[in-house]
């Protein structure tokens, strides 16, 4: 009885292979579910004890290999896999503790100054840059408005800003990166110098590679080469990135498992042309991937791409289905051991689905394309086309689930770009390698690579333009995703059978690719394993659907309305993700409650009365009667307002400096008065305006200073730079205003005053001070209601 028969019969060879598969499968499942179990053990043991218990159980089961019937062997394999699951959960818990322990822990709303090094390729979009930074105290994400200079990985920087908690759409993504907070930075200062040690050495290798890719070609082509070769797309303009996305070529701008496999398989065909045997080809391609990963930055996504690419390559070149399953499981364990949360990452799911599609479909598709032809170049092109088709079909349902779209142009665009993809990769990698020697000329390589990159960009432009290039497709969850894969598989099977019959090929040979792919006709175990992996991907994808890919569109995040209430103040803050906050309610005759009702506002998170004077608090009682108000906030009590609050059942809070309130991403911090100024028994303050609440409202980068009637000459505050200043006391004379303008550097000043008021507000002296400081000014007595809209990309006057 030969080896194959022994394995089918459950002999020693087959049992050993099943033993290894059970261990790997169990470990992969344990690692994948460890984030769901939390950092603690689901069975009441510490992670270390859990790993030890599982390992001992696995060893004992391995020593006591069963004989007997099939049922007994299945039971033994199930127990072995369960032991491996325990080991995987324990190892995952240890890794998660290490990942989370590296996160910087800061309180949301705190204004901080940090120093660190750039830890990832920045992401630039919608006038905003986001970059991960490693500080001596831990990791965090910095976001800042453009322009921000070159943020090379490893470069030192300093930043000042306000800490915020991650928003819902980004929470899971940042958790996978070991990041707990985001710094909305107002200032980012780039410094000289970088990291030391091995990380610093890799940074230098990458910097030399980037420099080499920019020599001998245009800046546009150089930015594309950095994306193709190093996975760094931050210099590619937004329009080009959108064209690559719509055409289904976006995967070329990031180092992915599909990309590595495509490069490796076509490189293998080139090695075959020069006569290298199969084992030598495998060795040299794996060596190429091992060199490529650190040169490309060695980040988590690139490590995953290398592992997935190598696993896919080993599996594709393997002659037995069992070896393919083994390579796939090994890749899952390796990537999940690096980060157990990786299975929730869209990139991981797409990479795994692409590899699986390539392993299952490349053989049949290649067989249909070339039959039994043995021509080297024809075989290489058929191989590349088969890889492209297989990966495209395998990832389409996941794209629909996470992004809500399917690119109909993806397949033709990828096939047309295919002849240029491998050459541009090879030329770019050779240029990056040669660039490590400063004297080595790279211009001949980069010039040709730039031409090929331009061709790929042209293909992206062609196929992104038609209206049919992309279609909206919504998949509701994991079950819908599983059904989509089942339907796609049925279509492919039927299609392959029809084409095989028309080409007078044997259907079984076309479908199984017996000679082309080396998969035996009896590969039922392989097909079962592939189906099981697809089910696992569907489940994981459904759990992680609300990920970073669901980032909301750039609608206004905060609207600030300086209401036209005549001679008085009333400012409405409306965050898109929270309930409105009203600061002051103007005089009673302004009917602010009616204004809010006309806007469809029925509930306020808070009504803030800066001080108890009629032009600020006169309309408060009506607002409390006619709207549902979460809380009434003041520094000095207004009896009419508090009485109305008591009748309405609204909570009241007396706040002083250091307090804050939040509504969604909006944070309103109290800068004045200090608690001791309003305490009973303290020395009386002659001017009640000096006890007016001074508020700093923040939303991401946007800040507006609301001064009430607290003039700067009497109120010592230093909030730092702000975007907008609401001038105190309707623009009355304020000798402290020039110093406040110097400290805050506002880009705009707003004044709330009534037309023709008897007080002469705003004062000519105040307007002169604003003009001398170069601060443009808007006034409600001239322009009426003023509205400001803040988005991720900046703010503007509406």
Image (spheres, rainbow, N blue to C red):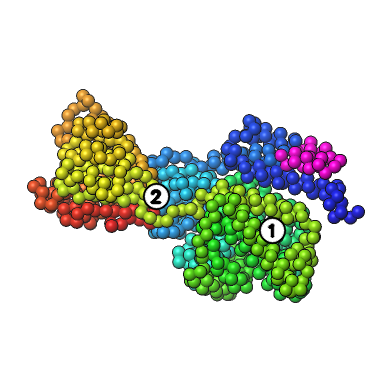
Viewer-side residue, 182 vs 196: 182
Residue depicted at 18% across the width and 39% down the height? 618
Q: Up-down: is 251 above or below 101?
A: below
Asked if residue 637 is positioned above or below residue 706 in the image, the reply reads above
Tell me if mark 2 has few (under 14), some (14-19) or many (20+) residues whose alpha carbon lies within 10 angstroms of its own.
Answer: many
Coordinates of residue 436 in the picture (x, y in percent) = 59, 63
Q: Which mark is residue 287?
A: none
Q: Is residue 82 left or right of residue 407?
A: right
Residue at the limit of the structure toward the right, as seen here: 1
Q: Tell me the residue at 78%/69% (across/down).
A: 506
In this figure, which residue is indicated by the disc labeled 2?
185
Number of numbered labels in the structure image: 2
Q: Is residue 506 above or below residue 638?
A: below
Q: Is residue 689 left or right of residue 168?
A: left
Q: Nearer the viewer, mark 1 or mark 2?
A: 1
Q: Is residue 235 visible?
A: yes
Crowding at mark 1 (Cα within 10 Å: few <14, some 14-19, many 20+): many
Q: Position of residue 231 (x, y in %)?
A: 55, 60
The secondary element bearing badge 2 is classed as strand
What kind of element bears circle 1?
helix
Give coordinates of residue 762: x percent, y percent. 14, 50
Query: Does residue 78 belong to the magenta stretch?
Result: yes
Q: Are marks 1 and 2 in contact (CB under 8 Å)?
A: no
- Residue 712 seen: no
What's the magenta region? 58-82
Mark pair 1, 2: CA separation: 42 Å
> Which quarter of the figure has residue 497?
bottom right
The residue pinned by badge 1 equals 312
Q: Earlier in the sequence, mark 1 or mark 2?
A: 2
């Amino acid at each position: 009885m030969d080896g194959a028969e022994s394995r089918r019969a459950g002999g020693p060879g087959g049992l050993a292979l099943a033993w290894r598969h059970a261990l790997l499968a169990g470990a992969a499942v344990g690692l994948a579910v460890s984030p769901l179990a939390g950092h603690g053990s689901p069975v009441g043991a510490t992670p270390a004890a859990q790993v030890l218990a599982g390992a001992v159980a696995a060893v004992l089961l391995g020593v006591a290999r069963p004989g007997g019937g099939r049922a007994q062997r299945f039971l033994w394999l199930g127990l072995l896999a369960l032991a491996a699951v325990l080991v995987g959960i324990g190892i995952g818990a240890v890794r998660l503790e290490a990942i989370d322990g590296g996160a910087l822990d800061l309180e949301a709303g705190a204004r901080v100054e940090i120093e660190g090094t750039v830890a990832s390729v920045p992401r630039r979009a919608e006038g905003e840059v986001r970059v991960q930074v490693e500080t001596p105290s831990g990791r965090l994400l910095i976001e800042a408005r453009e322009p921000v200079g070159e943020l090379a990985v490893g470069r030192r920087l300093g930043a000042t800003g306000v800490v915020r908690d991650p928003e819902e759409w980004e929470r899971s993504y940042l958790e996978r990166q070991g990041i707990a907070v985001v710094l909305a930075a107002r200032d980012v200062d780039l410094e000289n110098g970088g990291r030391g040690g091995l990380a610093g050495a890799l940074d230098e290798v990458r910097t030399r590679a980037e420099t080499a890719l920019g020599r001998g070609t245009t800046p546009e082509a150089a930015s594309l080469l950095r994306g193709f070769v190093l996975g760094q797309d931050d210099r590619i303009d937004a329009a080009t990135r959108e064209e690559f996305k719509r055409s289904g070529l976006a995967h070329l701008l990031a180092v992915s498992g599909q990309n590595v496999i495509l490069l490796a398989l076509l490189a293998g065909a080139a090695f075959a042309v020069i006569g290298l045997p199969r084992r030598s080809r495998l060795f040299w391609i794996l060596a190429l991937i091992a060199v490529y990963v650190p040169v490309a930055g060695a980040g988590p996504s690139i490590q995953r791409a290398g592992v997935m690419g190598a696993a896919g390559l080993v599996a594709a070149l393997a002659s037995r289905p069992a070896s393919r399953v083994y390579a796939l499981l090994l890749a899952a364990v390796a990537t999940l051991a690096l980060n157990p949360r990786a299975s929730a990452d869209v990139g991981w799911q797409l990479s795994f689905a692409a590899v699986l599609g390539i392993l299952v479909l490349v053989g049949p598709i290649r067989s249909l394309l070339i039959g039994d032809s043995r021509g080297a170049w024809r075989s290489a092109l058929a191989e590349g086309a088969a890889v492209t088709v297989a990966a495209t079909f395998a990832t389409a349902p996941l794209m629909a689930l996470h992004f809500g779209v399917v690119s109909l142009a993806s397949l033709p665009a990828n096939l047309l770009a295919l002849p240029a993809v491998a050459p541009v990769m090879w030329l770019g990698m050779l240029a990056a390698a040669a660039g490590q020697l400063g004297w080595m000329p790279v211009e001949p390589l980069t010039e040709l690579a730039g031409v090929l990159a331009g061709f790929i960009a042209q293909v992206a432009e062609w196929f992104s333009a038609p209206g049919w290039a992309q279609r909206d497709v919504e998949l509701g969850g994991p079950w819908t995703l599983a059904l989509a894969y089942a339907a796609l598989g049925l279509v492919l099977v039927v299609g392959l059978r029809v084409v095989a019959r028309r080409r007078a090929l044997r259907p079984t040979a076309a479908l199984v690719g017996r000679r082309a792919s080396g998969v035996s006709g009896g590969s039922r175990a392989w097909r079962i394993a592939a189906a099981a992996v697809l089910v696992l991907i569907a489940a994981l994808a459904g759990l992680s659907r609300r990920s970073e890919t669901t980032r909301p569109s750039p609608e206004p995040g905060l609207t600030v309305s300086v209401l036209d209430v005549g001679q008085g103040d009333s400012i409405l803050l409306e965050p898109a993700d929270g309930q409105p906050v009203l600061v002051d309610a103007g005089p009673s005759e302004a009917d602010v409650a009616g204004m809010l009702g006309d806007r469809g506002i029925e509930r306020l998170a808070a009504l803030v009365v800066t001080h108890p004077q009629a032009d600020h608090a006169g309309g408060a009682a009506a607002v409390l009667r006619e709207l549902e108000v979460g809380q009434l906030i003041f520094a000095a009590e207004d009896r009419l307002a508090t009485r109305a609050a008591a009748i309405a059942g609204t909570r009241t809070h007396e706040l002083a400096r250091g307090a804050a309130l939040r509504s969604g991403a909006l944070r309103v911090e109290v800068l004045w008065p200090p608690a001791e100024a309003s305490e009973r028994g303290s020395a009386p303050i002659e001017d009640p305006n000096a006890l007016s609440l001074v508020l700093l409202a923040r939303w991401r980068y946007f800040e507006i200073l609301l001064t009430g009637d607290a003039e700067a000459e009497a109120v010592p505050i230093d909030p730092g730079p702000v975007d907008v200043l609401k001038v105190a006391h309707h623009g009355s004379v304020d000798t402290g205003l020039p110093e406040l303008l110097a400290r805050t550097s506002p880009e705009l000043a707003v004044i709330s005053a009534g037309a023709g008021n008897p007080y002469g507000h705003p004062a000519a002296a105040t307007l002169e001070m604003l003009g001398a400081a170069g601060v443009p000014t808007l006034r409600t007595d001239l322009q009426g209601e003023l509205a400001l809209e803040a988005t991720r990309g900046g703010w503007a006057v509406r």
